[in-house]
Amino acid sequence: MSRAGRLFELLQILRGRRRPVSGAELAREAGVSLRTLYRDIAALQAMGAEIEGEPGVGYVLRPGFLLPPLMFSEEELEALELGANWVARRTDDGLSHAARSAMAKIAAVLPQRLRTRPQDDALIVGAGWRTAQAGELTLLRRALREERKLTISYSDGKGARTRRIVWPVALGFFESARVLVAWCELRGDFRHFRADRIEAAEMLDERPPRRRHALQKDWRRSMLTESDSAPVYGRSISGQTKGDSMSDELILYTNPQSRGMIVHWLLEEIGAPYSIAVEDYGTTIKAPEFLAINPMGKVPAIRHGDAIVTESAAICAYLADAFPQAGLAPPPAERGAYYRWLFFAAGCVEPAMSNHSVGWDPAADMQRRFGYGCYAAVVDTLAAAVAGRRYIAGDAFSAADVYVGSMIGFGLRFGALEKRPEFEAYWAGLENRPARLRALEQNEALASRQAWAPA
């Protein structure tokens, strides 16, 4: 066995012992002489291992020692580097500094051949969407560590403000949100609080009546119970006749972090009963069962009776026709503007925003190869279309407003669309529609269940 392997084996033996163990016993278990054992312990101590003891007394490894870097493979170092970079860019200042400090310590004692590994830029963490972080993550983490209650001032998705006392359970770091799981004394149940909606937080001296690990177990059990059944959404609407298209089962296949929110909003505007099947990006969305519905392996998609429809704009047009009682499409003879702007948003606005948001726009000599031409032309055209208008295709709200409004709302929120007065005025007339707020609340509940589901 190599010296590195022998040192690793000795650490593993010590890690398995909670009380001091004699040098003779360690030497016998490691298969080395007592003299070699003493040299190996001295080498580990020089590397930073907190091994306490001395010959004739015994040795014990104190908690907190990280396995020596010489035991890391190149792939393990890549994983550590990528994870540390994610933490440095996606968390609060305290964790960001700790991640950089940890990687610096590892780099300082790496073998020569791997010493430049942590400075390698082969694996890059993207910038991601940045949202205002009103909640103090450092304070939330401290409350979790010390198991203390918090008083928070919270603004929900509808803008309602409440003051609550909560018992922190966990803090989730997701790509576009940071979420505090806590028992809420006001609601008498577990709740998920987005950190960017926590307007103020204060840690109390009082501790919750139960330990955090016990609260976590109860919370996870409650999440499993909630996800066992697929809820049926929607409200009854007049004019439903047995045997017509509205009586067919309607299923929305979606993921809470997707364009499926567009269709979800439209379904709430329609009011007919529907159920939701949440597809997970890492697993079920590429499974044969879902690929039979959409071979592209993406959401949203719907099944309405025997009909399967994919692509958000197509789903919006289909549902408006399938449920005429909801009045979400103009009469056929008046659908010019309706179709024009619905599919302009799908064919021009969305790809232009997507490309522009990652810093790429087609050069002048390449614009004719792209269906939207250039970002500037798309933005100017869209701004002119909504300027001074409450609705995009006439005097009544339609499915086109759901799609166009969703594109504008998304673009304004994440910086993919210029904040022009025309866009802000148009979106202000749509974002607080009751159907959208219902869909948003349901979507956030689905996101919580999915995010916190056991791996």
Image (spheres, rainbow, N blue to C red):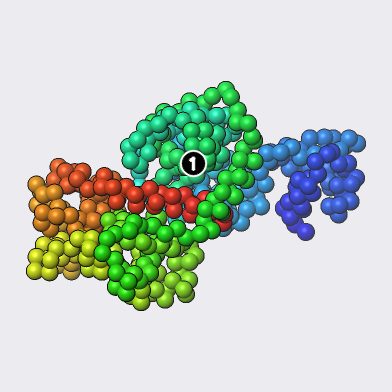
* Disc 1 crowd, CA 10 A, few/some/many (<14, 14-19, 20+): many
| Residue 235 relative to residue 202: left or right | left
In which quadrant will I find the N terminus? bottom right
Please tell me whether residue 173 is drawn above or below residue 328 in the rendered image. above
Let me know if residue 361 appears in the view: no
Let me know if residue 397 appears in the view: yes
Residue wearing tag 1: 191
In which quadrant will I find the C terminus? bottom right
Could you say where residue 37 lies in the image, as x and y percent from the top left? 83, 46
Out of 417 and 229, give the one closest to the viewer: 229
| Residue 14 relative to residue 338: left or right | right
Out of 331 and 43, give the one closest to the viewer: 331
| Residue 16 relative to residue 218: left or right | right
Residue drawn at 12 percent across, 66 percent down: 331
User: Which residue is the extreme one toward the top?
Assistant: 205
Residue drawn at 54 percent across, 50 percent down: 223
Residue drawn at 54 percent across, 58 percent down: 228
Out of 242 and 24, give the one closest to the viewer: 242
Q: Quadrant of residue 341?
A: bottom left
Q: Secondary structure at mark 1?
A: strand
Residue type (three-letter) at the residue carrying disc 1 = Arg
Out of 108 and 155, give the one closest to the viewer: 155
Could you say where residue 157 lies in the image, as x and y percent from the top left? 35, 42
Residue drawn at 66 percent across, 52 percent down: 71
Could you say where residue 130 lies in the image, as x and y percent from the top left? 35, 43
Q: How many marks?
A: 1
Could you say where residue 428 lies in the image, as x and y percent from the top left? 21, 43
